[in-house]
Structures are given as structure tokens and as C-alpha cells.
Amino acid sequence: MVLRRGDPDRGALIVQVADRGVAIALLQRRLADDFTYRWQRFEVPERGTAAFLADQSRIDPDLWAIELDIPDAERFVAEMTASP
């Protein structure tokens, strides 16, 4: 599900990963020291994802945010954030 629509051609991407409707992590694609993009995990803030996205969108108004509700979400997060 799309949580926040950003610019169609640019902007950061944040993925909220959920398991059976319970958000377990936020992933954001970040530029690494070797100039490649990697997914970085963030814990879901206690104040909620909506407040976190509101803060982030003030920094990057082109920000996109989506939610993936998938089985075995922890495994998905581990695979996405593993070093190459």
C-alpha cells in the first residue's frame, strides 16, 4: 500500500515492513560509503510511522513511503539489509 506519494521522478523511498498488520521495521535506501545504495533498517518509532513520515517529508518533500505486509517479515528485512 502507498502510505505517501512523492515526486514521480525523485525522492527517497521508505518501506514499512509489516507482518499481519503489525509494523516491525522501516527500511530506507541510503547511499553507502562506496557510492552504492543499500537498505538501512530503522525501528518503528513509538510515536508511530505517520509522525515519522511527516518529519521526513519536511526534509524531503519528494519522499515516497510504501507498506509491505508479508509473511516472515523479519527474514525479508534481514535479506534486504545484509551486506553484499
Image (tube, rainbow, N blue to C red):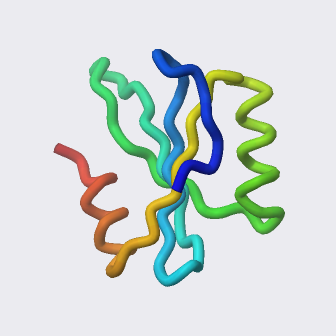
Measured as percent of width and height from the top left, residue 76 is found at 31, 66
Measured as percent of width and height from the top left, residue 68 is found at 45, 62
Image-based side of 66 in relation to 59, left or right: left
| Residue 63, above or below 3 | above
The quarter holding residue 80 reads: bottom left
| Residue 2, above or below 67 | above
The quarter holding residue 77 reads: bottom left
Residue drawn at x 53%, y 43% is 14
Q: Nearer the viewer, residue 65 or 27?
A: 65
| Residue 55, above or below 59 | below
Image-based side of 15 in relation to 6, left or right: left
Picture mark count: 0
Furthest-left residue in this view: 84
Residue drawn at x 72%, y 35% is 56
Residue drawn at x 28%, y 24% is 36
The quarter holding residue 82 reads: bottom left
Residue drawn at x 23%, y 47% is 83
Measured as percent of width and height from the top left, residue 84 is found at 16, 44
Q: Nearer the viewer, residue 58 or 69?
A: 69
